[in-house]
Amino acid sequence: MRTNPERRQALIDAAIEVLAREGARGLTFRAVDAEAAVPTGTASNYFASRDELFMQVGGRIYERLLPDEAVLAKSREGVQDRARYAELMHELVDRISAFGSGYLALLELRLESTRRPELRAVLTKRIREDIDANLAHHAASGLPGDSTSVLLLYLALNWLIVERLTLPDIFTDQQLHELVDIAVRRSLGE
């Protein structure tokens, strides 16, 4: 197997785009090569199997979805009240929506994981880590609410993002904005 890290990452990023656009059945080495604009056969030199490619894609999506340090630093500034909580949730929805192909690819991976136990294990571990990190961040932040508030927002906002990316005409941008505010308020019991 080839070890050029930049080429491997470019292939994985290309696989994300193919997976989002074509679904799991369309994720072939040939499709990844075409998307990455590399010679045919390149992806098969970097990944032993489609299963390995699926698992690599799952990890890479989360790397790209994480907030950068500037966003994290800003989240720790100022009064940690409901308004700040809503601001952070708007940033989250907008950041994830901006990488729509990544989120759609993640949905494809979730569906594929029902048929691939190894992929299910990878996604379960990664998503559990993400949830635990969100719970820990919330506990340390001083934001209002408890762990149940965090979990309710996780569930509600994930589906709101699905609606935004898959059926964008269901809700207007204004409605989506208002729904985030309402979700925060109600998760806090207000």
Image: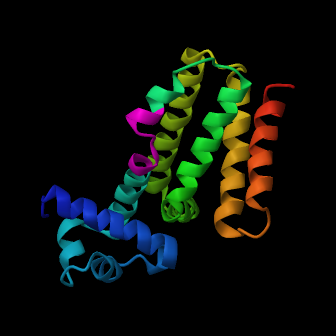
In the displayed structure image, the side of residue 16 where residue 155 appears, left or right: right
Q: Residue at x 48, y 49 (%)?
A: 123
Residue 106 in the image: state x and y as whole percent: 52, 59
Q: Main secondary structure of the magenta part?
A: helix
Residue 84 in the image: state x and y as whole percent: 65, 27
In the depicted view, which residue is nearer to us: 14 or 119?
A: 14
Residue 149 in the image: state x and y as whole percent: 73, 28
Establish if 174 lies above or below 115: above
Q: Residue at x 31, y 77 (%)?
A: 29
Q: Tell me if I can see residue 28 in this picture.
A: yes
Image quarter of the N terminus:
bottom left
Establish if 96 lies above or below 30: above
Residue 68 painted magenta: yes
- For residue 167, which quarter of the picture? bottom right
In the depicted view, which residue is nearer to us: 91 or 27?
A: 91
Establish if 156 lies above or below 53: above
Q: Tell me if I can see residue 23 in this picture.
A: no
- Looking at the image, which residue sits at the far right? 190
In the depicted view, which residue is nearer to us: 110 or 141?
A: 141
In the displayed structure image, the side of residue 67 where residue 180 appears, left or right: right
- For residue 4, which quarter of the picture? bottom left
Residue 23 painted magenta: no
Establish if 105 lies above or below 121: below
In the displayed structure image, the side of residue 122 where residue 179 appears, left or right: right
Looking at the rendering, the stretch of residues picked out in magenta corresponds to 62-71
Residue 185 in the image: state x and y as whole percent: 81, 31
Q: Residue at x 43, y 70 (%)?
A: 17
